[in-house]
């Protein structure tokens, strides 16, 4: 066995060789045998090997630990790079084959430290964003944000892409929160306005939905949960429905007040006391915005007044009923419908005295009768307007008859030119009478077919009146024609005498007759307006006959054709053949 002695460069330094030499000297002094010496040397050599072996093992262990540390550092570096999504550090990591282990560790340490700091910052950013998301989500869900646990950050993915995703989610939630908050404020404002109109306590109403909706709570702290929005919506709908019902009730009361006032002729001073009730009688729901306009006390006040007026109406029932009956009679009178007002008034009196019918039912029945009478009057209006025109034309025809019988109608007396103009217009109007009658008959028949009843004028069938008028008109024409023929026969001898002597009479020989007033002939009042034609017709006939006899008796010595000429001139001045100088009866 050979032992290698390490020679120290410094003198006096203890080495293995000096120790072995010292041991040899000791053995020599002691006298140890060679066998014993070899044994001792083998033992020393074995102990040296054990020491080297331990050192080698320690060095190998230390190298393994360094390699593990390097491996862990590389793994952590890779993990942080992946987690943070940072690819810039991958190019700065030293190669494992370049440099010693410690050099490699020294190169990785700064990058690893920087990634750790960046990770801590990224975790805080994630935690802050997730906390806000969690808070807003809790507000939307209706949870209590104060009792929420901190969010758990997933450190396996801390990339900027994921952080941007959380930021986008946060922005969407913030927008949704803003929209919800806007809706909440709109609902609260609507509730405030409705409570003002209905005279309700706003704070009590709104805090029943959620305590944070009062005026003292900050806007951002108000509840925006689904439940709050739903309850606010229901509250608004309930208040709006209540507003509609109250407005409908108030309008009904206002209508009843106006009807009762009109029935009893209530003075304006009393009506003005309820202007705040009647001012909304025709308003829509959206138009009513005044505070307290639909208060419950206001409606109760109106109900009390309606009840008071109803009681007053009951005491004045007869007066009110007769007032409505007078209105009904007036409508029928204007429509020329004949009724029996005495029996109707007796019936009303008996019903009220007997008490067998409710006052409201009686008034409602009379209102229904008035409505039907108005409808009937409207349906008869067209026919009645034409009847009035026909009657006016007949009156002008009667006036024209008197005018044509006046021998002084062409004199220069005062107003003669006005009568002449009227006569011209009357002839034109009289010429239209046949057309008027035909049109009127067609209108009457159409009305009777539509209503399945006869059209009566003041109780007399109008078609029968027109038929009678037509027959009497024809009789007048026949009578007039007979009178003209009779006059021609009577005047014939005078014509022959004038021809024999060939003389022409002087115009001064015309007879002087008493001047008759020209104007509208008396038409016997209402009987004429009801088309009672027989009496007037008979009178016209007698006047015509008597006038003809007077003309025959008082005829002067004049040409026999004088009267005939004047009558022909009158006929020629009328546009209707043979009708200008006829005697017509007024309806």
Image (cartoon, rainbow, N blue to C red):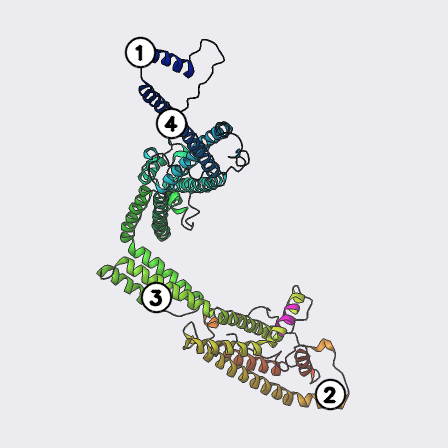
Q: Which mark is residue 30?
A: 1
Residue drawn at (34%, 33%) of the image? 146
> Secondary structure beneath disc 1?
helix
- Callout in the foreground (1, 4): 1
Seen in the picture, residue 37 relative to 494 is either above or below; the reply is above
- The span shown in magenta is 421-427
Residue 444 lies in the magenta stretch = no
Viewport quadrant of the N terminus: top left
Q: Which residue is mark 4?
A: 53
First in sequence: mark 1 vs mark 2 = 1
Residue 476: image location, x then y, percent: 55, 82
Task: Kindly identify which residue carries mark 2.
Answer: 498
Say which mark, if any, is on residue 341. Answer: 3
Distance from label 1 to label 3 (Cα)? 176 Å
Q: From the viewer's perspective, tell me whether residue 311 is left or right of residue 587.
A: left
Q: Give the camera-side residue of 531 and 494.
A: 531
Q: Main secondary structure of the magenta part?
A: helix
Q: Is residue 523 visible?
A: no
Using the numbered discs, state the Cα–Cα distance from disc 1 to disc 2 in whole angstroms. 224 Å
């Amino acid at each position: 066995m050979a032992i290698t002695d390490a020679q120290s460069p410094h003198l006096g330094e203890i080495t293995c060789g000096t120790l072995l030499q010292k041991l040899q000297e000791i053995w020599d002094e002691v006298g140890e045998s060679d066998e014993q010496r070899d044994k001792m040397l083998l033992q020393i050599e074995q102990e040296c090997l054990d020491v080297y072996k331990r050192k080698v093992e320690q060095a190998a262990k230390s190298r393994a630990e360094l390699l593990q540390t390097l491996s862990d550092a590389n793994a952590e570096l890779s993990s942080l790079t992946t987690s943070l999504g940072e690819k810039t550090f991958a190019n700065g990591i030293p190669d494992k084959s370049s440099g010693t282990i410690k050099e490699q560790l020294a190169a990785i340490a700064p990058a690893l430290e920087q990634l750790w700091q960046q990770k801590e910052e990224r975790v805080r950013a994630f935690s802050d964003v997730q906390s806000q998301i969690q808070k807003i989500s809790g507000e939307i869900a209706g949870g209590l944000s104060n009792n929420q646990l901190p969010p758990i950050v997933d450190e396996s993915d801390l990339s900027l892409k994921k952080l941007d995703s959380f930021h986008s989610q946060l922005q969407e939630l913030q927008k949704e929160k803003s929209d919800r908050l806007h809706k909440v404020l709109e609902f609260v404002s609507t509730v405030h306005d409705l409570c003002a109109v209905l005279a309700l306590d706003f704070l009590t109403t709104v805090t029943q939905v959620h305590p944070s909706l009062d005026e003292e709570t900050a806007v951002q702290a108000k509840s925006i949960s689904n439940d709050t929005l739903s309850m606010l919506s229901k509250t608004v709908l309930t208040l709006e429905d209540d507003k509609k019902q109250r407005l409908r009730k108030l309008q009904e009361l206002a209508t009843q007040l106006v009807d009762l006032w009109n029935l009893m002729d209530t003075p304006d001073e009393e009506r003005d006391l309820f202007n705040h009730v009647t001012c909304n009688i025709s308003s829509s729901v959206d138009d009513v915005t005044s505070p307290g306009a639909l208060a419950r006390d206001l409606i109760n006040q109106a109900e009390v007044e309606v009840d008071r007026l109803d009681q007053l109406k009951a005491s004045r029932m007869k007066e009110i009923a007769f007032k409505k009956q007078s209105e009904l009679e007036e409508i029928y009178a204007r429509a020329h419908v004949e009724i029996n007002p005495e029996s109707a008034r007796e019936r009303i009196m008996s019903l009220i005295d007997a008490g067998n019918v409710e006052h409201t039912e009686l008034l409602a029945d009379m209102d229904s009768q008035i409505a039907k009478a108005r409808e009937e009057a409207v349906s008869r209006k067209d026919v009645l307007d034409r009847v009035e025109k026909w009657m006016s034309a007949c009156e002008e025809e009667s006036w024209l008859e008197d005018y044509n019988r006046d021998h002084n109608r062409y004199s220069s007396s005062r107003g003669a030119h006005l009568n002449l103009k009227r006569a011209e217009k009357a002839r034109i109007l009289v010429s239209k009478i046949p057309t008027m009658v035909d049109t009127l008959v067609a209108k009457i028949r159409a009305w009777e077919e539509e209503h399945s009843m006869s059209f009566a004028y003041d109780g007399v069938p109008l078609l029968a009146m027109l038929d009678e008028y037509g027959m009497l008109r024809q009789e007048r024409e026949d009578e007039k024609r007979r009178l003209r023929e009779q006059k021609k026969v009577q005047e014939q001898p005078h014509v022959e005498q004038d021809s024999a002597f060939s003389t022409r009479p002087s115009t001064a020989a015309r007879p002087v007759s008493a001047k008759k007033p020209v104007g509208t002939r008396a038409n016997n009042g209402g009987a004429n307006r009801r088309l009672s034609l027989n009496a007037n017709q008979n009178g016209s006939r007698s006047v015509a006959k008597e006038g003809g006899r007077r003309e025959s008796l008082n005829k002067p010595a004049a040409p026999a054709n004088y009267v005939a000429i004047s009558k022909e001139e009158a006929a020629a001045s009328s546009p209707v053949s043979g009708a200008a100088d006829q005697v017509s009866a007024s309806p």
